[in-house]
Image (spheres, helix red, strand yellow):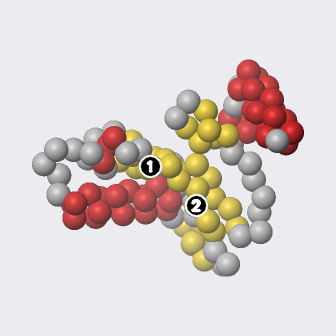
Amino acid sequence: MGYHHILTISEDAMLHEGSQRNDIDVLLGAAVIDACFGSETRRKTAEGPLLRGEKNAQILSGDTVHHVDEHEAGDFAVYIWVRGELRVPSALDERETDLAIVVLQAEKMR
């Protein structure tokens, strides 16, 4: 099975007065493809394309689609939502890591 991409999409960058729904659909689809695959970083390997995205892609104004990570189907990973961003644990500072541990311990106790 192929890779699975973890993305976040900011709603406010998609909400523009005067924008037509079809325009948003096309632009959002293109932004998802750009974030996942990127135009500069797509390379072929023996197994197929190497999936390395641009990490962020824009639609209308500002970064809208954020490529957080990608995994094969059998992988296991944990992500933490921090102040409007989905992050991998290695991207957290010490305070954020400590808080994430407290939250996970509280969830375990429920």
Please, is residue 25 above or below residue 100 in the view? below
What residue is drawn where x is 58% and y is 61%? Answer: 5
Rendering coords of residue 33 (x, y %): 43, 63
Question: Is there CB contact under 8 Å for labels 2 and 1?
Answer: no
Q: Quadrant of the N terminus?
A: bottom right
Q: Residue furthest front?
A: 110
How many neighbours does mark 2 have within 10 angstroms: few (below 14), some (14-19), or many (20 or more)? some
Res 49 → quadrant: bottom right
Q: Is residue 108 left or right of residue 34?
A: right
Instruction: Give the quadrant of residue 110.
Output: top right
* As drawn, 11 above or below 4: above
Q: Identify the residue under disc 2.
A: 5
Q: In the image, what residue type sits under mark 1?
A: Ile
Write the residue at 34% across / 58% down.
28
User: Quick check: 87 left or right of 98?
Assistant: left
Vertically, is 53 above or below 97? below
Label 1 sits on residue = 9
Frontmost residue, 9 versus 40: 9
In the rendered image, the residue lying farthest to the left is 18
Secondary structure at numbered mark 2: strand
Amino acid type for the residue under numbered disc 2: His
The residue at the far top in this view is: 95
At horizontal 44% and vertical 49% (from top left) the residue drawn is 9
Quick one: SS at disc 1? strand
**Residue 41 seen in this snapshot:** no
